[in-house]
Image: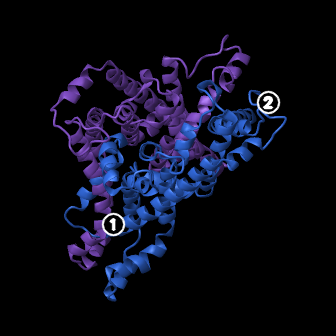
């Protein structure tokens, strides 16, 4: 198999690398225009007093923006919120995603249907999910409170969205609902790439499933779970849409992205907002340093 | 012996029941919010606050209103145009780029793939001000092209990865035969790869379409007027006379309208979408 690959590569005629770059050019130009350049500009703006109407003639003000950030209680609150959301929702999603992945991995009638059903929350636009849940969690007319009241779990309606702390809970709830399917698919792909005979052997020897899970599946799945969790963590830290809708402008529940955009656009302070965005950028870059090496393996696979 | 066998049977039956119950629970959790949105959208203003799980009366009043709303019509059209053009442009750019990445070894190849991967993790708010400036310079603020340009940061890196993976998995034989017969790289790509890549194109095109359809941050920032907004933005800004009087029936009807096409697409193409989603990130 390996030998085959080597000879195949040798047989491929060498092309000038110029034509490779010609093929790559449009894509690279796109990446530079949409990612590289704006990113550099944002970092640059974070050291200036730029405003939306005045992006060209800006004054360099050093690290004033960052000092102001460090002094703002709301910013620290936003950092805390971001981490609380990420730290709670990612493990929850992994746990629930694993259960769903195990269900989907089993061969049963209606597996295809089940897979389609599980994909539904992921498909629904985030704004729609936020609006749907806001309606369900409405303190007066919401179905959630109604059901909880009927089941006598609670005595009085709970202000899910209106109360600061609970609104964070609602954000996490909706995020988990929306993203667990994605996590489940990542973990399912991992399950499917495991040697399938170990599942079968365990089944034949009638070893209880929990034992198979603990002794075989989870240890083998460790790398997949780690990669999936970090991947999700990077995504969770930049959360914007859900928070924007569910916190309805309440700064006590803002996350770093929401805070940065609010200052950048709503308060017209591009310099300050860019500084906040830059901090978030470096934070994610730092998390990414952990993530990228884990992906080396994937890159090797491509070779 | 018989007793043992019976015990086995019961155990298996019990296991199956537990499994079924679990499946139903998961399905209910996944579907209920959408079901509830649909039910609420079918209620007249008089029954909106009723909490019957199965509605006794339904009306299309809300849908009639939403469809007759000009602003919503605009945003629906905008979303459709932006999402379609975004996915077409992404596909064109990435098909070209993925070909050398998947087929040839050259210096810089790994670096490009790593850069694409890191761009997928960028916080979008970190390109907001730079992008805003560029859109100003190109003079496309409040235009669909601004959104299409901005969405490239979301769709291109991801599509590039998935496409490279797909191309990589196509056997080399046919292509080599063509090259030996003197076909150019461009001919190989268009005449040999494109037909084989059908499924990959459907998958990545759909994922790009969904991403563009659902995007909110850029759409909120780079559009200003009702005529330019996309669906998520108008849904987010949709409000009644006051904060406490949100027209939930209408919002739910609009939500159902914008979600239904996506849900149908996903159900039809679920296999493809799953394979695309998982190549994009973890593949052991």
Instruction: Answer above or below: position of A231 versus B188.
Output: above
Is B152 rendered above or below residue A177? below
Q: How does the figure colour the protein chain or chains? A: by chain
Give a yes or no on whether discs 1 and 2 share a subunit. Answer: yes
In this view, which residue lies farthest toward the top? A155
In front of the other: A72 or A149: A72
- As drawn, B84 above or below A18: above
> Disc 1 or disc 2, which is closer to the eye?
2
* Residue B187 figure quarter: bottom left
Q: Residue at x 37, y 59 (%)?
A: B160
Mark 2 packing: few (<14 Cα in 10 Å), some, or many (20+)?
A: few
- Residue A27: x and y in percent read 32, 63
Does the image show residue A150? yes
Task: Tell me the subunit letter for badge 2.
Answer: B
Left or right of A91 in this view: B100 = left
> On the rendered structure, is A190 left or right of B111?
right
Chain name for mark 1: B
| Cα distance between the residues tagged 1 and 2 | 56 Å
Label located before the other in sequence (1 or 2): 2
From the top left corner, tell me how far across and down residue B217 is, in percent.
43, 42
Q: Secondary structure at mark 1?
A: helix
At a point 62% along the width and 57% down the height, the residue shown is B268
Residue farthest along the bottom direction in this orientation: B181
Q: Residue at x 61, y 48 (%)?
A: B72
Residue B46: which numbered mark, if any?
Answer: 2
Task: Name the spot of residue A290 as percent of width and height, x first.
Answer: 27, 39
Q: Quadrant of the C terminus of chain A?
A: bottom left
Q: Which chain is blue?
A: B
- Give the residue at x 34% y 89%: B181
- The quadrant the N terminus of chain A occupies is bottom left
Question: Which residue is identified by label 1?
Answer: B97
């Amino acid at each position: 198999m390996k030998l085959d690959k080597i000879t195949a590569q040798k047989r491929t005629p060498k092309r000038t690398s110029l034509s490779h770059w010609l093929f790559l050019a449009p894509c690279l130009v796109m990446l530079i225009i949409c990612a590289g350049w704006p990113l550099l500009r944002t970092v640059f703006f974070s050291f200036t007093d730029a405003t939306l109407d005045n992006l060209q003639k800006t004054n360099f003000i050093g690290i004033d923006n960052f000092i102001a950030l460090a002094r703002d209680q709301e910013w620290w609150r936003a950092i805390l919120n971001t981490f609380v959301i990420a730290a709670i929702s990612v493990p929850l999603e992994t746990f629930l995603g694993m259960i769903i992945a195990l269900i989907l991995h089993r061969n049963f009638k209606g597996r295809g249907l089940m897979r389609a059903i599980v994909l539904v929350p992921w498909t629904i636009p985030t704004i729609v999910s936020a609006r749907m849940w806001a309606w369900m969690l409405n303190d007066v007319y919401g179905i959630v409170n109604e059901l909880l009241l009927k089941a006598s779990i609670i005595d009085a309606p709970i202000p899910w969205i209106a109360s600061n702390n609970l609104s964070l809970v609602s954000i996490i709830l909706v995020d988990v609902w929306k993203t667990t399917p994605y996590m489940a698919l990542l973990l399912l792909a991992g399950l499917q790439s495991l040697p399938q005979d170990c599942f079968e052997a365990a089944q034949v020897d009638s070893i209880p499933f929990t034992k198979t899970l603990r002794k075989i599946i989870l240890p083998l799945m460790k790398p997949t779970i780690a990669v999936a969790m970090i991947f999700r963590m990077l995504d969770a830290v930049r959360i914007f849409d859900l928070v924007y809708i569910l916190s309805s402008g309440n700064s006590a529940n803002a996350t770093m992205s929401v805070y940065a955009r609010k200052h950048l656009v709503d308060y017209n302070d591009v310099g300050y907002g860019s500084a906040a965005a830059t901090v978030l950028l470096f934070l994610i870059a730092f998390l990414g340093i952990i993530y990228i090496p884990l992906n080396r393996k994937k890159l090797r696979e491509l070779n | 012996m018989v007793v043992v066998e019976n015990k086995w049977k019961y155990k298996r039956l019990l296991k199956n029941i537990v499994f079924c119950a679990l499946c139903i629970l998961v399905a209910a959790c996944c579907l209920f919010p959408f079901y509830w949105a649909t039910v609420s959208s079918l209620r007249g203003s008089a029954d909106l606050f009723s909490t019957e799980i199965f509605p006794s009366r339904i009306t299309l009043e809300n849908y009639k209103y939403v469809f007759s709303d000009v602003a919503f019509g605009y945003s629906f059209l905008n979303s459709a145009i932006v999402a379609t053009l975004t996915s077409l442009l992404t596909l064109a750019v990435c098909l070209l780029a993925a070909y050398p990445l998947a087929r040839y070894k050259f210096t810089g190849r790994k670096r490009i793939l790593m850069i694409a991967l890191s761009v997928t993790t960028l916080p979008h708010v970190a390109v907001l001000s730079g992008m805003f400036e560029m859109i100003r310079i190109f003079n496309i603020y409040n235009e669909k092209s601004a959104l299409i340009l901005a969405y490239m940061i979301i769709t291109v890196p991801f599509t590039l990865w998935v496409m490279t993976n797909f191309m990589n998995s196509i056997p080399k034989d046919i292509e080599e035969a063509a090259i030996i017969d003197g076909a150019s790289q461009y001919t190989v790509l268009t005449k040999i790869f494109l037909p084989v890549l059908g499924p990959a194109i459907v998958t990545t095109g759909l994922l790009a379409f969904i991403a563009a359809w659902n995007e909110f941050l850029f759409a909120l920032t780079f559009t200003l007027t009702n005529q330019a907004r996309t669906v998520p933005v108008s849904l987010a800004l949709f409000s009644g006379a006051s904060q406490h009087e949100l027209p939930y029936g209408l919002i739910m009807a609009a939500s159902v309208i914008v979600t239904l096409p996506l849900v149908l697409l996903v159900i039809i193409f679920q296999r493809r979408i799953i394979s695309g989603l998982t190549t994009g990130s973890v593949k052991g």
